[in-house]
Every structure is written in C-alpha cells, then in structure tokens.
Image: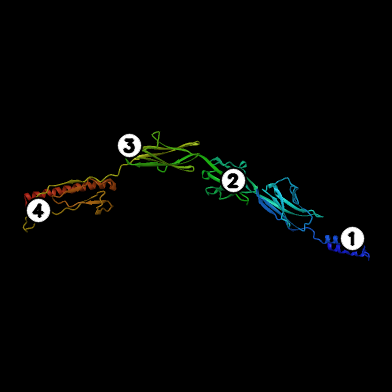
Amino acid sequence: MLILQTVKLILLALKLLPKRFTHRNVLFMIYLVTLVSHVMMDEPRFAQPIPNVTVAVGRDANLPCVVEHLGTYKVAWIHIDRQMILTIHRHVISRIPRYSVTYDNSNTWLLHVSQAQQDDRGYYMCQVNTNPMISQVGYLQVVVPPNILDIESTPSSVAVRENQNINMTCRADGFPTPKIIWRREDGQSITVERKKKVMVYDGEVLHLTKVSRNEMGAYLCIATNGVPPSVSKRIILDVEFSPMIWVPNQLVGAPLSTDVTIDCHTEAHPRAIIYWVYNSVMVLPSKKYIIDYNENSYRAHMKLTIKGLSMGDFGNYRCISKNSLGETEGSIRVYEIPLPSTPSKQITHVMEPKETIPAVVSRNETIKVASQPEVLFPMKNDEGYAQRSPNGIPFERKGSLAIGQSFSYTDMPPKEFGVSNDARSSFGVFSLLSLTTSVVQSTLIVLCHQHCESWLLL
C-alpha cells in the first residue's frame, strides 16, 4: 500500500516538473527523494509475542518485548489490571520499586518484577507510540503454595466422648485453590457414613459418627495445589471413656514357698491410675512384690509377682483402674495347692539267714525251696523301670521271696499315678497276703528241718 502511494507521488512530480531545471526545482526534487526514502523505510513491528510467565510468590519474573525497526519510536509497559503505566522507554514511571526495565541494545525490552506478589498477577501490555499505536499483551501468573488457616481449622487436639459425633475442619488458602485430603497417621482406615471405610477422605470437613475408641489417634489434614511444598496439620482425636478391666485368670493356685504372677488388662481414657490392693492395703513395689506395667495408647497391662508365697499371701487381690470418668476393679484369688507328693518310703523286712540243712530223700537229691512269684510295686522317679502295668503305671521289680533274703514293698501306690481307691486297697491286700505267705512258708521249712524230713516229701 505504501509502495503504491509512493509510485503515484513520483509520477505526479515528474508531470509537474518543467523542462528546465531551476534552483527551486532542485530543492523540490531533494524533498521528494527524502519523502520517498521515509515512505519506503519499514515501520516498527513486534518480532515475537510476549510469553505467559508463571512465578511463585516472592520470586522474580521477567517479561520480554522484542521490537524490530523501532527507530525513533518509544516503548512503554502498562499493567492493564491496575491501569498503571510502569515504564516509558528507559524510565520507570511507577512508584513501586519492584518494577524496572532494561534494553539489550538489540531489539528486546525487558520488564523486571522482583519479589512478585499476588497483586502483580494479571495482563501486561508492551506499547509502541506509532500512529496508529501498536501493542501486544502477556500474562503474569503468580502462584501461591498452600497454607493451612489455623484460625478456621480444628485445634491440634480435640476430645469427644465415646459413641458421640464429631466434625473436624481443615481450611487452607493458596493459588490455585488447594485440595484437602485426610489420612490417619497410623495407616488405619477412616470410618465415614457409619459403615464405609476409606484410606483417604477428600474434603475440608471430616464427619465422624458414633466415634469408638478404635478411632482414637492422630489424623493428618493435607493441603496441596500443585505448587510445592504441600502442607499438613496433625490433629489428635481423643475418645474419652470410663475404665474397663478384664482378668485372664481369676483363680491362680501355687504351692508354698514358690513365686506366682497374676495380671490384669485395662482400657481407659483419659489415662487411668492402676494399682493392686490386698487386704484393703495398696500393694507397693518391694522385694516381696514386683509390679510390671506396660502401656500402649489407651490400653494397659499390669502384672504382680509375689515372691516366696507364705500362708499370709493367699487370698483375694484386686486390680483397680480409676480415671476422671469412673472406676472399676477386677478380683483374682490366689490359693494354695499342695506340692507334688514324693515317692512312698520303702519298708524293708530282713529275716536272719539260717544255715540251710539239705534234706535227704531216698533218691539222694537235695531239696530246694521253690522260688515265689515276683511281685511288682509302683515306684515313682525311678529311671530303671523295666516293666509297666497295662494302664501305663511304672513298677519296680524286686527279687523272689527266698529264705534269708530281704523283702521290700510299698504300703500303697502314690496318688499321683491316678490309681483308684479300690485298686489301692486291692494292692495293699495283695502285698499283705504275699508277706504272710512267705513267712508261713519259711516257718514250715524250719520246722521240717528240725523235726521231720518226711514233710518235704509231701
């Protein structure tokens, strides 16, 4: 368009020129050449668009404006959102000291925004004062990492009675708007809508209904918006309830002079005071009593070891748990059991040996007394058992009832073997009959040697 107008202007000038050149004509030609050169020269133009720049709050940002063939024209920067002229050419107009401008002696005019704030977010215009004016626009995005608003959120510790409802709130600001999620610090699931269990819950408000003691613990509120760093808040939920006690063994038996341990388990929150009571007196740690206490969250396990039991140590021991909401106790009875019985003492009857007089018979044979059947008696703690009865009871084997030999027996099988009263009675009668038989036989043999050899032939 400009070239076409220039050609028309030259043709018009040639028609108007006279055939003879005068001084005035020469000056007019010089003017036309200068005008044509200005018309033929390129106008200022933008070499590239202004990029959109994103910067975190507090960081520096730079916006470039590349202008070709600027000539004598000037470049200005304007913040459209504020309707504020920032710079004109190399001069800063704005009173905000964080703005500045540089020129690289080429084609780039650079607007500097130091320590960008949220107010700096918006559109920026690079303008050249041509006629008509030319301009282009770029956008500066100032992002803000999330920040949890403690004033609008649930405190770091909150308490609720068991089986009641509670709402926990977590609010955060930032740009873009942060997303809020909830997690449990111990990795357990969160119970929402009564029965639904989730590992992660989205939303600013976490609503828990009919809270149980199992939901007690630390909850994490995490805010994120894609701008690092993400932030979180730790909220401890305390579920309060009165103490509860259960005793694994309510009856504990032990022999005298031994050690015995009794224990009880309790759950309570707030933390309960737990102690032992015997004969209406609190049991304190000593050489006689050893108290062991283990605690985990709202659960506790307490043990009491009684050293060297005596008759005065048997009776009822009470495990008591008490907090601000109530008190409860569990009872354990310690009773005596007899020590395992020891084997019965052996009673040994010894008969004086007498000289054996051989009996002479017609066949010149020596008479020998036939040995009696062996009798088995139950004996405890003997590793040399060679035989056991059909019911599995070990027996001790003793020799035959020959004259002049010792004879051993037990009065009655020990009770530990589980032998019935009838069996023990039969066993005693059998032992007594065996002893009586052997004595009678020995007496008869002596009399035969002294008076009558013919008795032995019978």
Q: Are marks 3 and 2 in contact (CB under 8 Å)?
A: no
**x then y, percent, for residue 283:** 40, 36
Q: Secondary structure at mark 2?
A: strand
Mark closest to the chain's N terminus, 3 or 1: 1
**Residue pointed to by mark 4:** 456
Q: Is residue 293 left or right of residue 75?
A: left
Q: Secondary structure at mark 1?
A: helix
- Corner quadrant of residue 172: top right
- CA–CA distance in space, label 3 to label 1: 142 Å
**Residue pointed to by mark 1:** 27
- CA–CA distance in space, label 2 to label 1: 89 Å
Instruction: Identify residue type, mark 1.
Output: Leu
Mark closest to the chain's N terminus, 3 or 4: 3
Instruction: State which mark lies toward you, 3 or 1.
Output: 1
**Residue pointed to by mark 2:** 206
**x then y, percent, for residue 171:** 62, 45
- CA–CA distance in space, label 3 to label 2: 59 Å
Q: Residue at x 89, y 65 (%)?
A: 11
Q: Is residue 85 left or right of residue 316?
A: right
Instruction: Identify residue type, mark 2.
Output: Leu
Q: Secondary structure at mark 4?
A: helix
- CA–CA distance in space, label 3 to label 4: 64 Å
Q: How is the image coloured?
A: rainbow
Mark closest to the chain's N terminus, 1 or 4: 1
Instruction: Identify residue type, mark 4.
Output: Leu
Q: Secondary structure at mark 3?
A: helix
Instruction: State which mark lies toward you, 1 or 4.
Output: 1
Density class for disc 2 (Cα within 10 Å; few <14, some 14-19, many ≥20) is some
Q: Is residue 97 left or right of residue 390?
A: right
**Residue pointed to by mark 3:** 311
Density class for disc 1 (Cα within 10 Å; few <14, some 14-19, many ≥20) is few
Q: Are marks 1 and 4 in contact (CB under 8 Å)?
A: no
